[in-house]
Amino acid sequence: MAAERRSEVSRPARPHLPMRPLWLCRACAAPWPCQPARLALLVEYRADRSALLIYLSTLMAEAGTQLSHLNGSAIADDLTERFLAWARAR
Ligand SMILES: [Zn+2]
């Protein structure tokens, strides 16, 4: 198995990962993906933007299901902006 290539990112004390089912960042409590999480994802997937978008789409679907149960309303437009808009290649 190839070693993970994370040498360019200093390992944070608390990684910016989503806290389910609220989808708030465990480290900074911002709606996930927060800015540090987006930067880390862009670095991690810099060689394969379409893989990043597929990964984010999967997470967005999961978040949509969990958040709609919590909120009782559809928030799909908001989630597209939050999960995908920033990651699309220009
Ligand atoms: Zn964060």
Image (cartoon, rainbow, N blue to C red):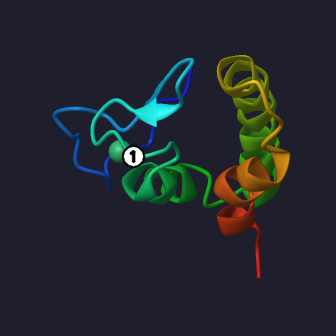
**Location of residue 75 in the rendering, given as x and y in whole percent from the top left corner:** 78, 43
**Apparent side of residue 12 relative to residue 45 in the rendered image (left or right):** left
Taking the spot 51% from the left edge, 42% from the top edge, the residue there is 32
The residue carrying mark 1 has its beta carbon less than 8 Å from ligand 1: yes
Taking the spot 75% from the left edge, 26% from the top edge, the residue there is 68
- The correct choice, above or below, for 17 with respect to 41 in the image is above
**Location of residue 39 in the rendering, given as x and y in whole percent from the top left corner:** 45, 59
Q: Residues within 10 Å of mark 1 (few under 14, many from 20)?
A: some
- The correct choice, above or below, for 35 with respect to 60 in the image is below
Where is the C terminus found, in terms of image quarters?
A: bottom right
**Location of residue 23 in the rendering, given as x and y in whole percent from the top left corner:** 53, 31
Quarter-of-image position of residue 64: top right
Taking the spot 75% from the left edge, 37% from the top edge, the residue there is 60
**Location of residue 89 in the rendering, given as x and y in whole percent from the top left corner:** 76, 73
Name the residue furthest front: 72
SS under mark 1: loop
> Label 1: which residue?
30
**Apparent side of residue 66 relative to residue 13 in the rendered image (left or right):** right
Q: Nearer the viewer, residue 17 or 9?
A: 17
